[in-house]
Amino acid sequence: MGYEHENSRGQKYYLHNRGKLFFFSKKSEDGIELPEGFIVVENQRTGLPMLKRK
């Protein structure tokens, strides 16, 4: 199981990637760990998590 993030609304998201593209999904299978040099931020309006470089 990879990196899991619970947003402010209580929904769980898991980190995935396709090449250099990183994205969050509600599906837990094939999740990856948080890459070094990144942090997770949350969109205040929608509650969706996003990766941001440190």
Image: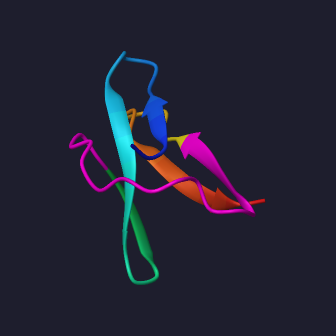
The answer to whether residue 31 of the structure is visible from this angle is yes
Q: Relative to 6, is 4 above or below? A: below
Question: What range of the chain is rendered magenta?
Answer: 25-41
The residue nearer to you, when weighing 45 against 53, is: 53
Residue 12 located left or right of residue 38: left
Which residue is more in the foreground, 20 or 1? Answer: 1
Q: Residue at x 59, y 46 (%)?
A: 40
Name the residue located 40 percent from the left edge and 32 percent from the top edge.
47
* Relative side of 37 to 15, left or right: right
Magenta segment includes 34: yes
The residue located at (47%, 33%) in the rendering is: 5
> Residue lying furthest front in this view?
1
Q: What is the quadrant of residue 23 in the picture?
A: bottom left
Q: Principal SS element in the magenta part?
A: loop
Give x and y (percent) for residue 36.
Answer: 71, 62
**Measuring 75% from the left and 63% from the top, which residue is drawn there?**
37
The C terminus appears in which quarter of the rendering?
bottom right
